[in-house]
Image (cartoon, coloured by chain):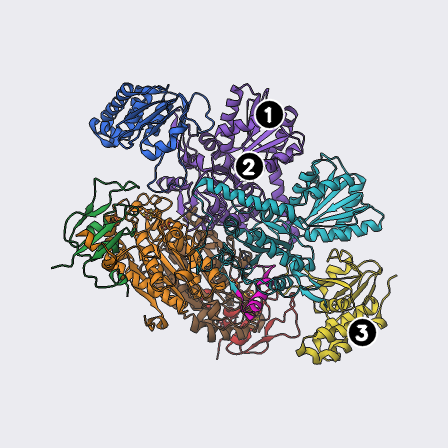
Chain colours: A purple, B cyan, C red, D green, E yellow, F blue, G brown, H orange
Amino acid sequence: MARELWKGNEAIAEAAVRAGVEAYFGYPITPQNEVLEYMSHRLPELGRAFVQAESEPAAINMVYGAACTGARVMTSSSSPGISLMQEGLSYIAGTEVPMVLVNVMRGGPGLGNIAPSQGDYNQICKGGGHGDYHPVVLAPASIQEAVDLMPVAFEIAHKYLNICTILIDGSIGQMMEPIQLPGMQPVVRKEYDWAVSGAKGRKRHVLTSIYLDVPTEEKINLRILGRWRKAQANEIRFKEYYLEDAEYIVIGFGTAGRIALSAVRAARAQGIKVGLFRPISVNPFPYKRVEQLCKQAKSLLVVEMNTGQMLKDIQAAVRNMIPVRFYGRLGGVMPFPDEFVHEIQEMIKDPGKPEDDPADLWYLRMMAR
Amino acid sequence: MARELWKGNEAIAEAAVRAGVEAYFGYPITPQNEVLEYMSHRLPELGRAFVQAESEPAAINMVYGAACTGARVMTSSSSPGISLMQEGLSYIAGTEVPMVLVNVMRGGPGLGNIAPSQGDYNQICKGGGHGDYHPVVLAPASIQEAVDLMPVAFEIAHKYLNICTILIDGSIGQMMEPIQLPGMQPVVRKEYDWAVSGAKGRKRHVLTSIYLDVPTEEKINLRILGRWRKAQANEIRFKEYYLEDAEYIVIGFGTAGRIALSAVRAARAQGIKVGLFRPISVNPFPYKRVEQLCKQAKSLLVVEMNTGQMLKDIQAAVRNMIPVRFYGRLGGVMPFPDEFVHEIQEMIKDPGKPEDDPADLWYLRMMAR
Amino acid sequence: MPAKGWIEVNDMFCKGCELCVTACPPKVLELDSEKLTPKGYHPAYIFKDGCTGCAICAIVCPDSAITVYREVTKAPASAAVGGD
Amino acid sequence: MPAKGWIEVNDMFCKGCELCVTACPPKVLELDSEKLTPKGYHPAYIFKDGCTGCAICAIVCPDSAITVYREVTKAPASAAVGGD
Amino acid sequence: MFAGQVLSYAAMDIGKEVTWIPSYGPEMRGGTANCTVVIADEEIGSPLVLNPPGVIVMNLPSLDKYELTVKPGGVLVVNSSMVDRDVARNDITWVSIPCNEIAEEAGDRRMANIVATGALLALLPVLTLEDIESALKAHMPGRHKHLLPKNVEALKLGAEYARKHVRKAK
Amino acid sequence: MFAGQVLSYAAMDIGKEVTWIPSYGPEMRGGTANCTVVIADEEIGSPLVLNPPGVIVMNLPSLDKYELTVKPGGVLVVNSSMVDRDVARNDITWVSIPCNEIAEEAGDRRMANIVATGALLALLPVLTLEDIESALKAHMPGRHKHLLPKNVEALKLGAEYARKHVRKAK
Amino acid sequence: MVATIVNPENLVYSRPKGFTDTPSHYCPGCTHGTAHRLVAEVLEEMNILDKTIGVAPVGCAVFAYNYIDTDFVEAAHGRAPAMATGIKRVLPDRVVFSYQGDGDLASIGMAETVHAAARGENITIIFINNAIYGMTGGQMAPTTLPGMKTTSSPNGRDVETQGYPIRMSEMLATLDGAGYIVRRSLHDPKNIRLAKKAIRLAFETQVHGLGFSMVELLSTCSTGWSLTPVQSLAWLEEHMIPAFPLGDYKIAPSVAALKI
Amino acid sequence: MVATIVNPENLVYSRPKGFTDTPSHYCPGCTHGTAHRLVAEVLEEMNILDKTIGVAPVGCAVFAYNYIDTDFVEAAHGRAPAMATGIKRVLPDRVVFSYQGDGDLASIGMAETVHAAARGENITIIFINNAIYGMTGGQMAPTTLPGMKTTSSPNGRDVETQGYPIRMSEMLATLDGAGYIVRRSLHDPKNIRLAKKAIRLAFETQVHGLGFSMVELLSTCSTGWSLTPVQSLAWLEEHMIPAFPLGDYKIAPSVAALKI
Ligand SMILES: Cc1ncc(C[n+]2csc(CCOP(=O)(O)OP(=O)(O)O)c2C)c(N)n1
Ligand SMILES: Cc1ncc(C[n+]2csc(CCOP(=O)(O)OP(=O)(O)O)c2C)c(N)n1
Ligand code: SF4
Ligand code: SF4
Ligand code: SF4
Ligand code: SF4
């Protein structure tokens, strides 16, 4: 099938359509507007539901309602809008209904700017909403990967009755790449034993997240945790480059990861034995694999477009077994591969000690320049 | 000065008044209603500002506005309401203005219930809002401690131009204890060089969180991070009990921590050399101290009223140096000391291996019973 | 002579709010101070003759605790409770 | 004879939107196709006699780019722009 | 609930540490409310106790719920005005006392819990009746001050009745 | 921007990997817009390049901003219709070409960027003019198809002019 | 005599089939119960119980799903209209209604309510206006009357600092998307009958696809008002009706034309 | 001749002092600029520039603080009325105003707007109604006209699925807390004059403590409407004014009595 040149946001929207999304509810925000705009003509033309909500809280609660019918439903937004969805997301998790969320991250905190950033990693992965729940989070690094993950996201959401988040930054949303779109899936509405649709010919279904009886709520919490543990077991995803003989390993997700690929190639060209590990599922996080890599690598370089949020997960896996170096750019700055190459070279010159605090040293370097 | 019997929520409100809070904006939610209700008569009678907002987003943005004037201002809420404040909190962090937030946690996720819980630890400490920022979070375990921390919270907020959160659960909010209230501080409105108040006789002040110029946003991010690093250096707080000769150490914050105190005493009564470490500042977290304790302790028991959220921070500090055991109750269940005592005994029988996953084993135990 | 009526109050539902007592046109209802419902309320009951089966009590009862009977059935249930 | 007037258009602010051109009663304004402002717009200018200094252009100018002069000053600035 | 607060005030006034905590759980409106009071000489840990040494139950649901939680050898006070069954356990000291009637006798039905408090302290002397009395004096809202004597009376009657009708643990 | 997309389509059609990314930064409305195109044979890493081998600048601000970023030995195409200064560097190959005028000559002012594209490819043959031509054929929206010949013309003129007036790197 | 009367063919009224057998958690005399019953009766009479999906609010009616015998979801506080929209858009041929209190609908849910109405969203809202926050302990609501004492306006609502009550029906009536907007009361048999008629018409409006419908019901909260249930009905009539006049605020011509 | 005329005493009009020297980021012909100027002139004429605090929205006017020469804060999207409330409550003797677009005020900020009005919050809102989301690229706004094409209603706003425009002034006029609510337009000199008068009266309302004041200004978005600036003014007059009639929707007696 021929490749087509697509803008990231529109490709994601079309991929969702082909994955059988039945309803989209959203609110405009840069840099994800093209998702909403694309849906605004594409879904009605297919007789599916599109609503530009009055706000993100409204959008997520429309999603909540639609999700309760068992339909494949999604919303998309960017950082500030995602913050406004946190209550709704917690309700959806607590009610154990499936949905797909796309966060096209921008520079923050606050209004920040519309440039690409990875500053929402903690919010998205560590639970921005209240209570104990864990969304599955997939972080593609290219438009093709995003498109390929779209149907996967819906399947995960339904399989674990959970939120599945596609986490990208503004650059993936705004850039264009040649891609192959998946085929069009038919819309299938199963009669789930939990979904609401009118109680015709069956006993009624009630979906709620309130459990005043405390022991019951504890059981629900454990049930949610149980599904999450299954996701932890089944949904680990990552991609590895040039690791076979790598003595040094760069780790980055999403855009930082793909930029690192260029850096790794450049370093290899200089004869440096360096490879790249790019987590795709950032929640659940591939701790085990990172742990294994510590046996092979002399030291790690973690690159992010934030102050080192994923770094904490890396450190949890590394446990000071080998030195870790960190390099991050903030507030929407997109690093150049050259910066990473420089960091690789510096790391090799002086890998530092395993007990060093990488974020600490990075901060001092940033302030020094 | 004589002790008085106060309900937690009301004591916190009065402590804030005495700490010179000039304005309170909030929205009713159980189990923190008494804070709002107390303020509704106390502040007007002192000629200070009280507004029952139309919602939590409105409340936090009223706080945002008032904070921009340099006044001491606060809000309080409980889990779902806190989720709705995430956008506003991120704006406040991004605008670098001071405020105090009180979260009286309840069972979640979703609507959950009104029973005491510690399920919002991640949301509150790891950043529930978008972008890179870090609120200071203090978790008192008694009404007296909460009352004593109230003025501290305002000082921290102003010192680091940051959010300072008092993190308690419904039980502390609802229970009564004899306390000594601090003296009444006068309301002092300084003329800060950043606050807005009308530009009379000075150049105008503008407070914003939008920095379209990416390098500028990066500088702001680093400035915010810089202040956070100072807080990390200065604001570590914790309390230790029976640690001198302790071979086993229980770690818990807030209510779980105080329940553990009873358990530790009971275990000591059985001749077990066990002590208690209770973090008070959960963000910044006392990693260093926990690391030191690993030298002294044979193993640790972490107790929480959630699925093991603080546990991750403990593990980051322990790095598999010694075995860690976890015990948590969920969804608003308040554990009895006897449960912890049992866990201590079990831990001593079989401390397990350092590389065991405590949350894993705990989950299996929970499902087994 | 007025139609003969009768009501039964379901102890499961009655909370002794007295709305039926005050609403009852012939004033034949009162709370039974002797009796306690499982939930601990004094339920309503007919303490004297004269119930017309007008179902006014049932209309005002917030807990649908009342079943109404009437010797000569005229209107369908819905009508009795103000159906259109 | 009409009052003699003159306007000056500030290149810093003018974006060549033409609102003043269409609003000008004596139609003495047009965009200067020869000239480019620092921001790359063709600014407005008086291309022929007849400006009355009515300040209509200044009222409609969304970028406050226009300063208006009038030989015989009548009303205070505010009045000219519709102050009360 | 009120009884618990009176105990708390009394304990505080004689310089002890004390915590009072209401019960949680589904009963939102009109359900049975109850509270736990912990009195100690040192910083109090848990405000909840699995097996309390002393328990007062004012109605049947509460008896059913809490009879088994009383610590062996502990004390259980049952308000027989609202409870028509005896206590099944024989490893605890208990008394079945018609609080409502005694309260009425003392002058006000609503003092039933004070009667029960008197009974509890008679069998579990963590505090003296005088402690309670002065606590009432000190903390009763002004508009209720006139009820003080009645309350003290109720307290005493409760204590007396308990001493007379107590069933000791076997 | 459009030129960038044409390049992207052409690269894709001959089976190469390509990324097109618009510039970010404060210029929201009416500022100078620009984009980066990366063409490669393998999976593309960074869509941004610190020192691109080939750069087209259509106006003065862009020249000021990007002149120094061109990779030594790389190519810089300057639209002299909008830029009144020469290129200062002598370690790069560059040409100063009146795109607007040439475009007008070819039949439409708005094809200035196509002219520049022709010039770039003449000096940096990552793609052939034919690649571009067929890309235009394949991807030009129907309603513009009639402009195809003109575009091809503009492309050629740009290339010719560039070959004639190129200043080689020293 | 009883014996003779108590037999099926003499049955004049009994608990509606649309109701479950669960005793309600409401305080004695709370007219939430009355409103529930009317909804259940209407759904039963329209024979749409099995194609209806209810949306419960956060408020004392949070457990509405325990009583009204249809599929149900429980919304986040104030977001019921948004949740109902989400359901209705994927199941356009089902009947979707939300049941909300004044804090839920008029305070935190204001935007969702207004926009559902502006969109002409084909849903029905049963709006219980009891001038107070019942569930959380009697705090001030957007509908609390001037001078009215609540736990967050202990000296009575001071309009200078706490503002004025919002009349939702009047406000929503200004929107073109609104098909049927009326205010009724639950304080006596006559008005309860009228309330039921209105609820019927609201659901008919939805079934006929005539746009957004809302029935505002003046309701009591004896607990929040600290009155007896009987006093509460009188207080409602005396104080609330003047502040919230009963009436039809918006009846689209298409709705007026409905023959039922 | 120029030389002779161009001297101070002939000065009829020049850029107001309330304005900074920063050229605006607005598109050519965008009447946001006109609205800014009127506000600056009014604050200058009332001599309250140095006791005024502005609240900028999220929208094209996000940088209002770069132009109007007073203390300023920048609010979260739609929350400007709440933020203004927070400021006003701690600084009651200052003048606080927010400047908001239709997406900001009428969509995401609906609840904050209605409740600020209901509270009679002593603040002033300048409401720019341009029937579209300018900043984010021309999506549909709550004020977008039926059939109007936007980037999120590409085939024209379909009232069946996307609802009807909201008339904020009419809606807010139903609230007792509102002191002064009017709609004006910026499409020609006469209306610009009237707009300025209204803005003046709105600020006077606040200064005299007479409650919530809002001036809704019909404004152009040539970029979003894909018209020239000149065409935009005509389009506004032809299409927007019929849908959003100009007029006074609420003038409290106390405000009407103001002598200025
Ligand atoms: C986000 C959020 N904020 C606040 C609450 C607490 N809360 C529960 S119900 C309620 C208001 C109830 O009042 P109303 O809507 O009038 O219903 P009523 O109880 O009076 O029937 C509030 C504020 C909540 N559950 N969630
Ligand atoms: C929470 C949040 N949601 C969405 C956005 C994106 N956004 C910025 S401005 C805007 C709307 C602008 O339209 P309007 O308020 O009408 O102002 P205009 O630009 O037309 O002047 C939106 C949706 C945001 N910044 N924050
Ligand atoms: S109205 Fe109903 S609940 Fe109330 S007393 Fe009568 S029967 Fe009982
Ligand atoms: S109105 Fe102003 S900005 Fe527009 S052309 Fe005239 S002077 Fe220039
Ligand atoms: S609190 Fe009020 S609204 Fe809630 S159930 Fe009781 S009476 Fe009804
Ligand atoms: S997009 Fe529209 S509203 Fe925004 S500046 Fe341009 S013309 Fe004005």
- For the residues beneath circles 1 and 3, the answer to whether they share a chain is no
Mark 1 neighbour density, 10 Å: few (under 14) some (14–19) many (20 or more): some
Indicate the position of residue B297 as horizontal and vertical percent values: 78, 41
In the structure shown, which secondary structural element does the residue marked by tag 2 occupy?
helix
Front label number (3 vs 2): 2
Does residue B201 show up magenta in the picture? no
- Image: A82 above or below B2: above
Does any portion of residue E98 appear in the rendered image?
no
In the structure shown, which secondary structural element does the residue marked by tag 1 occupy?
helix
Indicate the position of residue E93 as horizontal and vertical percent values: 84, 64
Mark found first going from the N terminus, 2 or 1 = 1
Residue assigned mark 2: A368
Mark 3 neighbour density, 10 Å: few (under 14) some (14–19) many (20 or more): few
User: What chain does mark 2 sit on?
Assistant: A
Does any portion of residue F57 appear in the rendered image?
yes
Residue drawn at the location 40% of the way across and 44% of the way down: A49
| Chain part drawn in magenta | B29-49
Mark 3–mark 2 distance (CA, rounded to whole Å): 71 Å
B273 or G110, nearer to the observer? B273
Badge 1 amino acid: Ile
Front label number (2 vs 1): 2
Residue assigned mark 1: A348
